[in-house]
Image (spheres, helix red, strand yellow):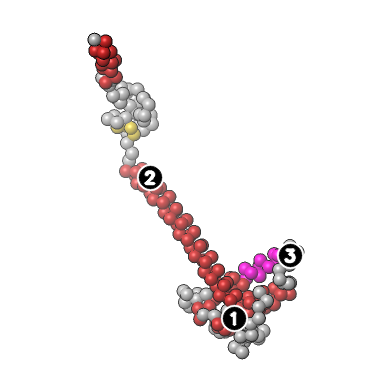
Amino acid sequence: MRRMIVLLMVLLLAIPVLAQPDPCGNELLNPGEECDNGGNDQACPGDCDYDTCTCRKESAFVLFDLAIGHNLLFSKVQDLLHTIKDMLFQLEMKTIEIQLTDFNCSSQPVSFWIPAEYDPYGKLNEIDGLVKLTIQSLNKSITAGGVFGGITAETLQNANLNLSTAEQCIVNQAYREAFECKCLAYRVTLLNLTDNSVQCNEDGQCNIV
């Protein structure tokens, strides 16, 4: 008997909750509503959907939201592509650095003396960048009073002289000779390695020994 009385009381208490009307349309702004009838459409005058008590969005705004989302996604994709590109470039530069360090100038691949403007696989531009970056780093070390393998300001001057000769070779379309000057600047002048496989003359002519 007691259980039946408790069950009856629960049912009586639940009836008002179950019978509670939808607050949308009661002319009051209730939690979760953007607008309501009875003049409560200040958030979107004339554009209130009284069935859901939310503001209607024009197609232009929907397209704008989609475009914003697309642009954000595109931006993230672009950032990722730039990151991948930077990683690949660093890997490529490291490969070139190892190749130039481990093998003499006359044993380097043909792609090393081809400019990128003539062949997308040409590496002459990257080698030029590697040599210049090395000179710049060593110059900062010397300026700060550091010593790196006996490198001096005169050493860097000689390396820059080789690069100048290389540029003259490029003007003369002697790309292999230009590479040889850059290679010697890196291997012999900057790394103090022995390499008698090629020569770089100040008159702009580089000849294989």
Where is residue 126 drawn, in percent x and y? Answer: 55, 72
> Which is closer to the viewer, label 1 or label 3?
1
Looking at this view, is 191 or 206 the one in front?
191
Q: Earlier in the sequence, mark 1 or mark 3?
A: 1
Look at label 1 and name its amino acid: Asn
Instruction: Relative to 173, say whether 97 is above or below.
Output: above
Instruction: Relative to 71, say whether 7 is above or below.
Output: above
Q: Quadrant of the C terminus?
A: bottom right
> Which label was assigned to residue 65?
2
Evaluate if marks 1 and 3 touch, with contact meaning CB atoms under 8 Å apart: no
- Residue denoted by label 1: 104
**Can see residue 109?**
yes
Q: Secondary structure at mark 1?
A: loop
Residue at image point 31% right, 23% down: 23
> Which is closer to the viewer, label 2 or label 3?
3
> Which is closer to the viewer, label 1 or label 2?
1
* Chain part drawn in magenta: 132-142
Relative placement, left or right, of 120 versus 167 is left
Relative placement, left or right, of 123 versus 185 is left
Q: Secondary structure at mark 2?
A: helix
Distance from disc 1 to disc 3, alpha carbons, whole Å, reads 28 Å
Evaluate if marks 2 and 3 touch, with contact meaning CB atoms under 8 Å apart: no
Q: Secondary structure at mark 3?
A: loop
Residue at image point 36% right, 29% down: 32
Q: Quadrant of the N terminus?
A: top left
